[in-house]
Image (spheres, rainbow, N blue to C red):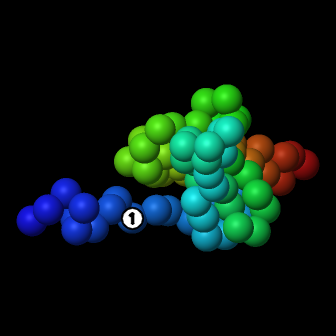
Amino acid sequence: MSLFTRKPEALKKCAFCGGEPRIHRCGDHKEYVMYQCSRCYETPVGMDEASLCDFSARRRWNKRTEEAERTLKTYKRLMAQTTKFTSSEP
């Protein structure tokens, strides 16, 4: 199987709004690649940190999504504890 016919890593949905990621090329000659949410326009990195290859850009998008999911789980757990603590007061 050729490197060019291999299926790329699947992109996760946006960690902030659930939108679909889209490729965004930047640089003087559009040689840099980054992913941006098609709904809220969030990106995992600034344009000065864009990748030279699609593989790295996909990996950064998915990593940012995983980090945001962990943060959201922690936030929900802490909110549940706070609610439980405040509702048990007389």
Can residue 81 be seen at all in this image of the molecule?
A: no
- Secondary structure of the residue carrying tag 1 is loop
Q: Position of residue 75 (x, y in %)?
A: 68, 45
Which is nearer the eye, 29 or 51? 29
Q: Choose top left, top right, bottom left or bottom right for residue 67.
A: top right
Q: Choose top left, top right, bottom left or bottom right for residue 18.
A: bottom right
Tell me the residue at 77%/44% (across/down): 82
Identify whether 14 is placed above or below 64: below
Identify whether 34 is placed above or below 51: below
Tell me the residue at 84%/46% (across/down): 86
Query: Which residue is most to the front?
Result: 29
Which is nearer the eye, 84 or 46? 46
Which residue in the protein does label 1 denote? Answer: 10
Give the position of the N terminus as an image quadrant.
bottom left
Q: Position of residue 9 (x, y in %)?
A: 34, 59
| Residue type, mark 1 in image | Ala
